[in-house]
Image (tube, rainbow, N blue to C red):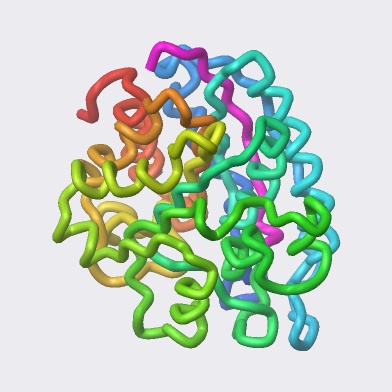
Amino acid sequence: MDRSIAIVGAPSSIGIRPYDDGTPRRLDLAPGALREQGLVARLGARDDGDVLPPPYRELVRPEKAIRNAADVADYSRALAERVARAGIAGEFVLVLGGDCSIVLGSLLGVAGRGRTGLVYLDAHSDFATADLSTTGSAAAMCLALAVGRGEGHLATLRGPEPLVAGGDVALLGRRDHADARYYGQDALERFDILDLDHAAVMARGPLETVRHTLERVARPEIRGFWIHFDADVLDPADMPAVDSPEPGGLGLDQVADLLGPLAQHPKALGLQLTIYDPGLDPDRQGAVRLAALLQRVLGKGEMA
């Protein structure tokens, strides 16, 4: 990658359900765990610090509602300001999260650059609505909210216009078919989202998947695109430190082969990493692997 890289930490877990014992998840540790691997120096990046979230308030979910919805909205706006600032000089913005709901702030932060596409690499479609969700996690609804599916502040962060049009979204690698109703499989089609699930990605291979994805998110009328990378798209054998591991998944090399050409495309505005939980990674092997993966994806070296 020839462009300069700015790193922003988004150490938030307010958009995801707590652990089973009722305590908040330790996603707040993720940016620090990755920085401890020397990621800033390895990428030759500028560190723009962390956007700190408010405390986790709604440990008990409000009925048929999104946990911490007002706080997630406020946090999204704060993160958007930092993402916009970090990318103002054309820097590639790397956001170290954090739960998946940070995509709302990231998209809001790049909204001023014109029509934006979204690559969503995730084991889950995150397309639930509050009435269907069993957890109330904004992280399980954030793609839906980003395209304007749902109600309330989180679906209207940009006013009546969604953060991204469904027809400008490519959803890659999901393997959540056992929960099709919960994750809104039919709704993905209604919103014209390009849905290349795990089986489709494996069948096409990385080159064809990237080509098909860029046809969607890098069309001439789109000024740039954002990349969401959820660590749970990886095989749990490589990355067990996530909140909702699904059987199977992509290997580290497969993810690198997918994300590398996308992140290094001239229209790529930035990339966010989500759902890595150091609280589930006491020996920090997950951090080691993710730091090496990001280094390779961003064209700054090979994984060991």
In the image, 277: left or right of 200? right
Name the residue rendered at 68%, 26% in the picture: 49
Name the residue rendered at 40%, 17% in the picture: 42
- Residue lying at the far front in this picture: please name it: 221
Q: Relative to 124, say whether 146 is above or below.
A: above
The reply to whether the magenta stretch includes residue 302 is: no
Q: Relative to 48, say whether 278 is above or below.
A: below
Q: Relative to 202, say whether 111 is above or below.
A: above
Prevailing SS of the magenta stretch = loop
Image spot of residue 238 (x, y percent)? 26, 52
Q: Assign the N terminus to one quadrant of the image.
A: top left
Q: Is residue 55 visible in the rendered structure shown here?
A: no
The reply to whether the magenta stretch includes residue 12 is: yes
Q: In front here: 26 or 183?
A: 183
Image spot of residue 129 (x, y percent)? 64, 78
Q: In front here: 205 or 97?
A: 205
Give the magenta part as a residue range: 1-15
Image spot of residue 43 (x, y percent)? 43, 18
Image spot of residue 253 (x, y percent)? 20, 41
In the image, 284: left or right of 48? left
Q: Is residue 254 visible in the rendered structure shown here?
A: yes
Name the residue rendered at 41%, 48% in the picture: 216
The answer to which image quadrant residue 141 occupies is: bottom right
